[in-house]
Amino acid sequence: MSTPTTTADAAVPLHDAPDHETQAWWRDAVTYQVYIRSFADGSGDGIGDIAGLRSRLGYLADLGVDAIWINPWYPSPMADGGYDVADYRAIEPVFGTLAEADGLIADAHDLGLRVMLDIVPNHTSDRHEWFQAALAAGPGSPERARYHFRDGTGPNGDQPPNNWHSLFGGRAWTRVTDPDGRPGQWYLHLFAAEQPDLNWTNPQVRREFEAVLRFWFDRGVDGFRIDVAHALAKKADLPDLAQPLPADESNPEPDHPYWNRSAVHDIYRGWREVADSYDPPRAFVAEAWVRDPERLALYVRPDELHTTFNFPFLQAPWRAADMHAAIDSTMAALAAVGAPATWVLSNHDVARQVSRYARVQGEVPGFNLDDLAGLPADLEVGHRRARAAAMLMLALPGGAYLYQGEELGLPEVEDLPDEVLADPTWTRSHNTRRGRDGCRVPIPWSGKTAPFGFSSMGAEAAWLPQPATFGQHAVAVLDQQPDSILNLYRRALRIRRQHPALGDGELEWLDSPRDTLMFIRRPDFRCVVNFGADPIRLPLDGTIILASTDVPDETLPPDTCAWLVP
Ligand code: NOJ
């Protein structure tokens, strides 16, 4: 006898007034991240776009998510996948037009899906009109004061102003050439040289971004994900770092000259006022890599942002104690400020969870492909753990983000040919770090050969090559398999919508056997996860309404999550 991974729908009571239908929808929404370049191509050039996304909105509504977050879709030279924005009030022509964007927002709303955009306030593109004006205007000008320009050090000013590093490799400063052809000042870029950092002490910068928020809120956008939300404020005088090593975003020391400075909070209080001036109020989610939960919680105080991604959960090894600690510390810190948790297992910056969990856990030094490369991988184990992790995440109190393709069980593409790599990390590290392209490969929809239905207009290939194995992950294939990961996500999301215990609220841990976690959500919901290498006797009474693998004879296999009702 085994319990298949199906739902006993009758056992799930109806959810009366879920938060996702109220103004505080963000407290428990499940948001699907659309990496637009790689989601669906509607124009036939092998690059995903708005037309492609519009044609697949039905898929997302059917999956059962509440909202979508679209990675930057603004005009951009694409030095960093669109995180180098040349114009914040327009659409990149490769992706479509403003009229199509309006159409997408309307279509999504018709289907009950909210739309979050991505705002990039730490830096612009070097092609942005402000930066071009700064180059033309010269030292000491108001145009340069919107960025961080400094004279160089050393006898000829040919040394950078300080010892900061770019996150993508190399130094965080580039020297400009003046109009007369002579070497000029240096400008700061924490990321690529094509991404000059803005100076957030300049009132024009503040005014401009509040106006950009309004531009999109007026078009009906429901909220924004804020790119590197913890980097905007820099310490006056830009002092040298005590330890001039490539920076670790997650663990900034107090008083670090650019990570997580307290001055960022005032910026977000202003943004909250803008969001609250709309009916219904708009919402924010911060991308803030701040490991200390108490310091992270400061971003979501009642007059600041609504939510912030929980990266310690994403970074935790697949082990009971690590997961327990990540969940507990976050929930305690966020509860203290009245904010919900926002869980996430992957995004366009980290290796896909199937491939992370395929490695021996706890020995992986990080969560990027460059950390994993070379370590032995068992993708079957990774897949099993990814299924269980999704169920664990969706049972936790708060909201959650899914990254496109995780519902298809896609692994990281670890062997992209060197010549297709587009992540600036590759060139800036002198071809030593391959970067993040492996999780950005266009997703498979149907068919047996690449591009697997990615292009409805018949492009021959997608912009990054898809491996032949992507065929077995195609939506059309997984649709037909009752126990596929796609159908598991659909069932989990349906139960989550219907069950009154799920979404926002509290969690109560139960004592559980070694290598397992067990908790209750009231009323009438229980979740158990076996992280261990051995099967265990199911330690809870009740009826299983969903399990990530078969649960034969009351025995919970390794790497399995089960949901039960009394
Ligand atoms: C975080 C984004 O998620 C990442 O893709 C980007 O490279 C950096 N911020 C810089 O904007």
Image (cartoon, helix red, strand yellow):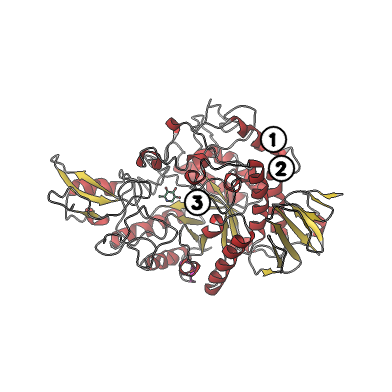
462 and 191: which one is in front? Answer: 191
Circles 1 and 2, Cβ within 8 Å, touching? The answer is yes
Can residue 143 be spotted in the picture? no
Q: Specify whether 68 is left or right of 477.
A: left
What amino acid is found at the position of numbered circle 2 in the picture? Answer: Ser
Q: Quadrant of the C terminus?
A: bottom right
Q: Is residue 316 above or below residue 460?
A: below
For marks 1 and 2 on the same chain, the one whose residue lies earlier in the sequence: 1
Q: Which residue is mark 3?
A: 366
Which stretch is magenta? Answer: 298-302
Which mark, residue 447?
Answer: none
Q: State the separation of the CA atoms marked 1 and 2.
A: 9 Å
Which mark, residue 477?
Answer: 1
The local secondary structure at tag 1 comes to helix
Q: Which residue is mark 2?
A: 484
Q: Is residue 53 magenta?
A: no
